[in-house]
Image (cartoon, helix red, strand yellow):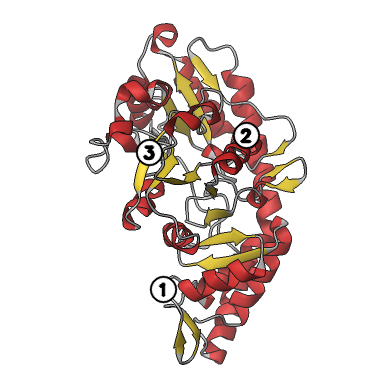
Amino acid sequence: MKEEMKKIYVTQPSLPPLKEFVESLKEIWESMWLTNEGKFHKEFEKQLAEYLGVKYISLFANGTLALISALQVLRISGEVITTPYSFVATTHALWWNGIKPVFVDIEPDYCNLNHEKIEAAITSKTTAILPVHVYGNPCNVEKIQEIADIYGLKVIYDAAHAFGVEKNENSILNFGDLSILSFHATKTFNTIEGGAIICHDEKTKKRIDYLKNFGFANEITVVAPGINAKMNEVQAAYGLLQLKTFKDQIKSRQEITAIYRELLEGIDGISFLKDIEGIKHNYAYFPIFVDESKYHQSRDDLFFKLEKQNVYSRRYFYPLISEFPPYRGLPSAKPANLPVAEKIAKQVICLPIYPNLANETVVKIVDIIKNN
């Protein structure tokens, strides 16, 4: 009988050495300082900014709270142009701020917001553009900024997938007015839960820090109706340890990506993304796209076939955000307006990728795909 593969999930969190984390916890226990910008929080912000090559970073309890707060920081209102091809938190952040999302189709090469479609969606109520660096592959930041400058719009990047990504040796987080990171357990860099806002000047950093701490400027002064979105000391201590091994984790992801690409090359009906010239990638995901007419099985057929072999891939992103009940009534959510996103959402499967994924397991996954 053929040996059954153990359960392989689409991702697996990278963890710091437990012994080192316990030492950090001892220090936190001795200080009894658990939150409100303690020693570990301050050091984590400092080291993160240096590591990522950004001027200012503000830590958050999670990426969704960071995005909700970013919209408040820039006082965004009215309509915001965004993508239907993302995790639903991207659009939920707009809804929580009373902002109307306007969906624009994506480009087929890297699944990012199509800059050529943005201008047609701009109205007198448009105040910002909210693109996503999908799978960590950068949007066309120059073209998007050019449009934003012409129409006087703000640009906030959902960079949840883009930790450590660089364009021509410059952090992708330095583009736009603000960028948002997620440190959720499923991300390339995690603090269990967590997130951050990246900005470019001290004044904005100060406003962000006020808003994430109930709006307090000092003990007796509240300058805005803020929320409680702070990262605690335990998460910050965990994050500091994660930074030590991040380069090794990306190297492992790159090696796994190379194996997938070599083995999948030439399979009719299966395509995948290639590296972009001038980009330092983080290899956060490995999506493949199934063309049923050539592969002779549907995406869902392959998805469930993998599952039967204990390979738990993910149809990421499916369904489109525009298809969920809160948003499908919007004029911009009509499928006819989003043909590329509709097509890709029905073709995509993200295959397992994480630093501890064994090479022989990657080979077995590809063998399942080949035997259609």
Picture residue at 48% right of the left edge, 27% below the top: 117
Question: Viewer-proximal residue, 342 or 151?
Answer: 151
Q: CA distance from mark 3 to mark 1?
A: 26 Å
The amino acid on which the numbered mark 2 sits, given as a three-letter code, is Lys
Question: Viewer-proximal residue, 148 or 192?
Answer: 148
Q: Quadrant of residue 139?
A: top right
Q: Residue under label 2, please give it.
A: 143
Question: Viewer-proximal residue, 344 or 358?
Answer: 344
The amino acid on which the numbered mark 3 sits, given as a three-letter code, is Val
Mark 3: which secondary structure?
Answer: strand
Mark 2, residues whose alpha carbon is within 10 Å: few (<14), some, or many (≥20)? few
Q: Residue under label 1, please give it.
A: 226
Return the disc, 2 or 3, that comes first in the chain's sequence.
Answer: 3
Please state the horizontal and vertical placement of residue 258, each as a whole percent of the image.
Answer: 66, 29
Question: Viewer-proximal residue, 190 or 343?
Answer: 343
| Mark linked to residue 192 | none
Residue 183, above or below 41: above
Q: Is residue 173 left or right of residue 350?
A: right
Of the 4 image quadrants, the one containing the N terminus is: top left
Mark 1: which secondary structure?
Answer: loop
Farthest residue, direction front: 124
Mark 2: which secondary structure?
Answer: helix
Q: Is residue 327 left or right of residue 242?
A: left
Mark 3, residues whose alpha carbon is within 10 Å: few (<14), some, or many (≥20)? many
